[in-house]
Amino acid sequence: MSSKRIVIVTGGSQNIGLSIARRFQKSGATVICADLNPPQDNSLNFIATDVSNEASIMAMMDQVEMDFGHLDVLVNNAGICIETPIQDTTEQQWDRVMDINIKGTFLTTKHALRLMKNPAATAPAIVNISSIEGLGANPLHAVYAASKAAVAGFTRNTALEYGPYGIRCNAVAPGWINTPFNERLLAQYPDREAVDTEIEALHPAGRLGVPEDVANTVFWLASSEASFITGQEIICDGGRLAKLPLPKL
């Protein structure tokens, strides 16, 4: 497979998205970070994009088509999370999370498809970032969980409808990944060492995830090595969901 693939990563300017962008760039791909703010890495292409706004997405896709003619890989990574009890969640909060996490995935996919149908596209693939929270529950994350479960469902439909065009679509469901957001969450506890030990114990892999774990999974799913995999949600959680809880004896 040609290393000069054209890749869009939404939310690609920071955290997991930036790791994904860099992983594709390492292979020789041309990577476009579609985000509100540019990445600090000047070697990455950047197109200012609001994934909750269809006109913004259309303008970004038009620019990619003008510059490169086609699209090989789309990674729908942009997402936000709020921590609010269901009873206290406002309609505006619900709409904002849904607009970015699932409507953004829908709109970006919708307008990427014509570029991926271009005969110049090489083994086109879409990878959506879902979450283990679409499969299990954490308190105060009801809106986020609902949006990520929707991403998984949308992934299957995309694979079904566009498989005949040679376009594959899969999702990656990360577990606990060491990002600045999670670091701030852990930093509030006075006994940080005890907290780290407790959280690591949830993972049979014996450690927390890092952004590169997700990036490598996404890269593999978009590669020719995964050419017979489509419509799937791949869990990247260090075995957390596979571990049944036991009482402390």
Image (tube, grey):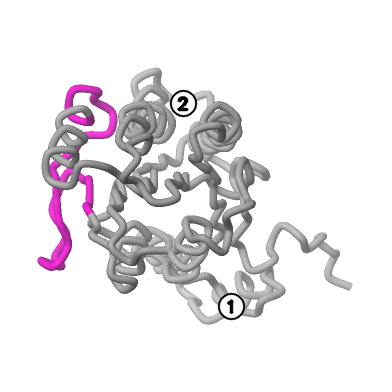
Position in image of residue 106 (x %, y %): 41, 28
Task: Name the residue tied to disc 1.
Answer: 207
The residue tagged 2 is 88
Percent x, y of residue 55: 18, 23
The question of residue 47 being in magenta is answered with: yes
State the mark number for residue 161.
Answer: none
Task: Work out whether 116 lies above or below 185.
Answer: above
Rounded to the nearest whole Å, what is the CA distance between mark 1 and mark 2?
34 Å
Q: Residue furthest right?
A: 249
Residue situated furthest front in the rendering: 119
- The answer to whether residue 73 is left or right of residue 225 is left
Is residue 192 placed above or below 93 in the rendered structure?
Answer: below
Label tally:
2
Magenta stretch in the rendered image: 32-57
- The residue positioned 68% from the left and 74% from the top of the image is 201
The residue under the point 52% across, 70% down is 209
Residue neighbourhood size for the residue with mark 1, other residues' Cα within 10 Å, grouped as few (<14), some (14–19), many (≥20): some
Q: Secondary structure at mark 2?
A: helix
Q: Position of residue 238 (x, y in %)?
A: 64, 68
**Residue 112 in the image: x percent, y percent?**
32, 34
* Quadrant into which the C terminus falls: bottom right
